[in-house]
Image (cartoon, rainbow, N blue to C red):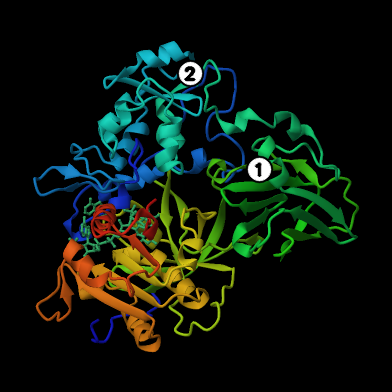
């Protein structure tokens, strides 16, 4: 560890299937990039071509803008993905990718794609007509020069997109002429392909495809029902899951409405309950292992912004108490919305966004800032350790979504008690790339501006840490972000933890995030150690130098005892993470002992 004073400042300042998140493996310095950033501005949205199909809903048409639509969430990750074309060493421009780095031709960045989609050019070859596509017809369009793909029952002609796809043409071709929904979901469910490929929409599948859109699959008749205290029939996962399916009820007094959700789970806690009340729309989501239960109602009458959520942890009861605006008797709770009273796999639930206010922006290093976002008063949401959220912005008329991992406002130095979680703010430590599409827009937000923030996602389980004696955290650059809560959790709440060791890879000293705080923590808590490793140090650097390698890992990742229970978490640019995992396996660590943070 280097003992030099840190540069932390507290100055207030201003998978690779088709739609890869280019940023996930962003590598190299912003200084190395060049490209099309200047062209970002001034794109006028182009109206949709006239639809000649019966007026069935198109993807992304559902009301609300934040509803059950991961599909609506944002194609724009690609926008961000391809935000900045740059030249690799060979001089060919390429983009950051999910797992791959595929050189794209000049003029094929995400911004170029957006520009093309707004140009009014007929990208489907159907002159704006929307058609019904049979499976046979779909199968015919399976070549690079004529490629149709079905996603959630909607067929897109992706031929013009081929050269713009950050994951490369071959990845896109894996779904040519077929239903690519599952492949798409495996990699980037959150990417808003509807927005991205809007101008490529050919029409709907004539027959219901296997992976038909969830919106159309179930509850239409129920939508008409009014909630009168009787529970409508629940949609469950299957007969075997029925007993575990939560249920709800509601009651009222003169001034209050209380909705009670019986989760049928022990150990319910605030991280498993997400409640939003926007205007008259109430949405209460309960996370039960891999599943999600939802109460979603257009309330009968208006309520006040204030609400209370009480969780009886042991009996698994969640009570949401709303204050009536007017003291009148409600005949019903309200109109059930489409996903109301459903219990589905969490991954099948659409991402839900709420608008959060930017309340502060503080410099952490020369290029990284700590953003503090305030949740709406009528939202209850706690982001679990190891999980991320998605931020959504409209950039050049297109929705862009990027994942970010909430951190704490600072590193607590005293781990005697669980740190105070206010539940009102989300802190994000974000590196601003000089050519970054999303981060540039983010950096231009003013204090008081709003940005959409999704509910949490991620596959890290706290139970992975709960039995660890030695915890190793390998972080590169902003790959440090998931480690913040993880360190805090391990040092505070895991009694068997003996050592927590952070091995932090950065280019230069100036890039080290929260160096001072980390050094303080290492001094204060003997269980915690930090090792900084620089890949591009100045000659004054007395510490460790290099990149992730088997020799560095064997030097720093060592079991305390032969049979120590070890967990190694790794996060950074995708190639860093992938290489790290391989080296660790070669060093004899098992799959269960390694957790890689990815999108
Ligand atoms: P882009 O427009 O995608 O480009 C990024 C910049 O990186 C470009 O300007 C360029 O200079 C550079 N770049 C891109 N590709 C390359 C390359 N191949 N080689 C060299 N340079 C390249 N980021 C955070 O800062 N904080 C977080 O907490 C955080 N959490 C994340 C959580 C998850 C699960 C994932 C997957 C990513 C997370 N990220 C986080 C990264 C974040 O999602 C964005 O990718 C990042 O902010 C860049 O977005 P952008 O649109 O500004 O950049
Ligand atoms: P950076 O500053 O570019 O790099 C940090 C360190 O990693 C540097 O020492 C760098 O060495 C090294 N490195 C970069 N690419 C490497 C590679 N391919 N092989 C070996 N070492 C490599 O990092 P950054 O800009 O902050 O980027 C952080 C990354 O973490 C982003 O890609 C972001 O998406 C990701 N992230 C992911 C999550 C998640 O949960 N999945 C959360 C947060 C961040 P060099 O000198 O060689 O470049």
Q: Earlier in the sequence, mark 2 or mark 1?
A: 2
Q: Is residue 351 above or below residue 520?
A: above
Tell me whether circle 2 and circle 1 mark residues in contact (CB < 8 Å). no
The reply to whether residue 75 is in sight is: no
Decide if residue 224 is on the left or right side of residue 63: right
**Mark 2 lies on residue:** 130
The reply to whether residue 117 is in sight is: yes
Q: Find residue 158 and report its horizontal and vertical position in percent.
A: 35, 26
Ligand 2 visible in quadrant: bottom left
Residue at far front of view: 562
Q: Is residue 172 above or below residue 347?
A: above
**Mark 1 lies on residue:** 343
Tell me where residue 157 sits by quadrant. Answer: top left
Q: Residue at x 31, y 51 (%)?
A: 23
Q: Find residue 268 and report its horizontal and vertical position in percent.
A: 66, 61
Q: Find residue 588 and report its horizontal and vertical position in percent.
A: 27, 59
Tell me where residue 241 sits by quadrant. Answer: top right
Q: Nearer the viewer, mark 2 or mark 1?
A: 1
Q: Secondary structure at mark 2?
A: loop
- In what quadrant of the picture does the N terminus appear? bottom left
Q: Which sits in the foreground, 586 or 166?
A: 586
Q: Is residue 465 above or below residue 291?
A: below
């Amino acid at each position: 560890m280097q003992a030099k004073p840190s540069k932390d400042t507290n100055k207030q300042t201003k998978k690779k299937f088709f739609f890869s998140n280019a940023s996930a493996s962003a590598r190299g310095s912003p200084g190395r990039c060049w490209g099309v950033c200047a062209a970002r501005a001034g794109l006028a949205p182009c109206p949709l071509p006239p639809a000649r199909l019966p007026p069935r809903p198109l993807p992304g048409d559902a009301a609300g803008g934040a509803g059950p639509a991961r599909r609506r969430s944002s194609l724009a990750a690609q926008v961000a993905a391809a935000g900045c074309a740059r030249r690799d060493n060979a001089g060919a421009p390429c983009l950051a990718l999910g797992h791959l780095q595929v050189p794209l031709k000049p003029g094929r960045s995400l911004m170029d794609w957006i520009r093309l989609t707004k140009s009014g050019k007929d990208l489907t070859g159907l002159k704006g007509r929307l058609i019904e596509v049979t499976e046979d017809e779909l199968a015919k369009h399976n070549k690079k020069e004529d490629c149709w793909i079905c996603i959630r029952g909607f067929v897109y002609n992706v031929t013009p997109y081929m050269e713009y796809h950050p994951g490369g043409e071959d990845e896109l071709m894996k779904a040519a002429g077929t239903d690519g929904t599952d492949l798409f979901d495996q990699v980037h469910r959150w990417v808003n392909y509807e927005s991205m490929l809007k101008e490529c929409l050919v029409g709907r599948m004539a027959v219901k495809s296997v992976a038909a859109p969830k919106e159309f699959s179930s509850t239409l008749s129920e939508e008409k029902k009014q909630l009168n205290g009787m529970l409508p029939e629940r949609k469950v996962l299957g007969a075997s899951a029925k007993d575990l399916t939560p249920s709800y009820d509601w009651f009222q007094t003169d001034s209050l409405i209380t909705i009670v959700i019986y989760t049928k789970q022990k150990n319910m806690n605030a991280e498993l309950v997400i409640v939003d009340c926007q205007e008259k729309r109430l949405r209460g989501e309960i996370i039960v292992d891999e599943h999600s239960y939802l109460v979603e109602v257009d309330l009968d009458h208006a309520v006040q912004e204030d609400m209370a959520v009480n969780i009886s942890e042991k009996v698994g009861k969640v009570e949401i108490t709303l204050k009536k605006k007017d003291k009148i008797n409600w005949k019903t709770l309200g109109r059930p919305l489409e996903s109301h009273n459903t219990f589905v796999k969490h991954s099948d639930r659409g991402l839900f966004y709420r608008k959060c206010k930017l309340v502060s922006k503080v410099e952490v290093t020369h290029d990284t800032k700590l953003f503090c976002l305030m949740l709406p008063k009528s939202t209850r949401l706690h982001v679990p350790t190891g999980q991320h959220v998605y931020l959504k912005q409209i950039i050049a008329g297109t929705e862009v979504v990027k994942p970010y991992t909430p951190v704490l406002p600072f590193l607590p130095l005293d781990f005697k008690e669980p740190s105070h979680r206010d539940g009102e703010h989300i802190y994000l430590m974000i590196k601003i790339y000089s050519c970054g599409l999303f981060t540039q827009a983010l950096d231009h937000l003013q204090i008081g501006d709003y940005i959409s923030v999704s509910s949490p996602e991620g596959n890290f389980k706290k139970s992975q840490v709960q039995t660890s004696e030695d915890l190793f955290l390998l972080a590169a650059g902003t790959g440090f972000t998931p480690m913040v809560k993880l360190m805090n959790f391990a040092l505070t709440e895991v009694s068997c933890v003996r050592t927590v060791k952070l091995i932090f890879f950065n280019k230069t000293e100036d890039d080290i995030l929260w160096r001072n705080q980390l050094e303080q923590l290492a001094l204060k808590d003997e269980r915690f150690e930090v090792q900084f490793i620089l890949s591009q140090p100045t000659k004054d650097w007395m510490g460790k130098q290099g990149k992730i390698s088997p020799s560095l890992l064997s030097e720093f990742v060592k079991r305390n005892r032969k049979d120590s229970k070890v967990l190694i978490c790794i996060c950074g640019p995708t190639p860093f993470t992938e290489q790290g995992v391989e080296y660790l396996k070669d060093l004899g660590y098992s799959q269960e002992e390694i957790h890689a943070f990815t999108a």
